[in-house]
Amino acid sequence: MDLAPCADVLGSADSPAVGTRSFGADTGLVSRHTAAAVAGLQGAGVAACTKHFPGHGRTGTDTHEAIATIEGGLDDLRLRDLPPFEAAIRAGTLAIMPSHLRVPELTGDLPATVSGAALTGLLRGELGFTGVIVSDALEMRATRDMFGIPRAAVPPAGPLTPPSPGTPSPSWSRRVRARPPRRRATRLAASSSRAPSSVPPRTAATSAWRTAR
């Protein structure tokens, strides 16, 4: 699986969260390239995971640091941000990644990652997506500081609501944050040494990309 393509339509060229990962600021162009990327990846045997639902391009906040709010209401979202995800679904994307984004008219104070209105109502119900939903990283501060990692990963029965101000994070979550970083570089170096020296051309991906242009 590739955690791509990025289906976010930029609202600002200086978006701290998306930047050059986006295909651009034009909804139609982003939709075409998103569909082509899905077709190319999956045509080469790699599952696509289209992100960041419902659209991270019009936010000025990096969700690694805090929850981000998408400006405007549902009408703006449907007009500008959702078409690339609809294009990805039509192209057969096997997975979609929601991000820690608030749409006050839709999710209230919750991020889309844990919002039934966003995931069950909008993504599953309105857009008809039946594939896999892959959450954005739960150790990002947007969710970690609001709920703690365990509570965001396995919401309790009933509505999930932000804790009252001053509520301490669960001790398990604090222990996770306190862990030293794993020796990832060593593992990556070892896996790289075993990687094949050449990669076969992905003709399906190239063809889909050229068609989109």
Image (cartoon, rainbow, N blue to C red):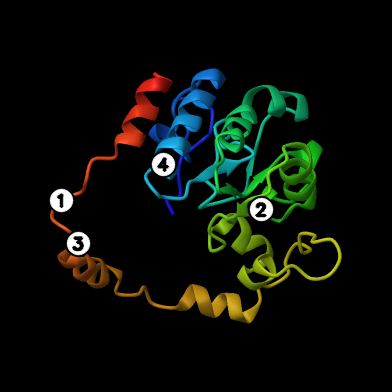
Q: Mark 4 points at which residue?
A: 43
Q: How crowded is mark 3: few (under 14 residues within 10 Å), some or many (20 or more)?
A: few
Question: In this rendering, would 53 be left or right of 45?
Answer: right
| Residue at mark 1 to residue at mark 4: CA–CA distance | 19 Å
Q: Which amino acid does label 3 sit on?
A: Ala
From the top left corner, tell me how far across and down residue 198 is, in percent.
Answer: 15, 50
Residue at x-position 55% and y-position 19%: 28
Q: What residue type is labelled 4?
A: Gly
User: Which circle, 1 or 2, is nearer the viewer?
Assistant: 1
Residue lying furthest right in this view?
158
Sequence-first disc among 1 and 2: 2
Q: Mark 3 points at which residue?
A: 195
Q: Which amino acid does label 1 sit on?
A: Ser
User: Which circle, 4 or 3, is nearer the viewer?
Assistant: 4
Location of residue 15 with respect to 185 vertically, above or below: above
Disc sitting over residue 69 in the figure: none
Quarter containing the C terminus? top left
**Mark 4 residue element:** helix
Locate residue 1: give its quadrant. bottom left
From the top left corner, tell me how far across and down residue 49 is, in percent.
Answer: 51, 47
From the top left corner, tell me how far across and down residue 62 is, in percent.
Answer: 51, 44
Residue lying furthest left in this view?
197
| Residue at mark 3 to residue at mark 2: CA–CA distance | 34 Å
Disc sitting over residue 113 in the figure: 2
Residues at circles 4 and 2 in contact by the CB criterion of under 8 Å: no
Sequence-first disc among 4 and 2: 4
Sequence-first disc among 1 and 4: 4
Q: What residue type is labelled 2?
A: Thr
| Residue at mark 4 to residue at mark 3: CA–CA distance | 22 Å
**Mark 3 residue element:** loop
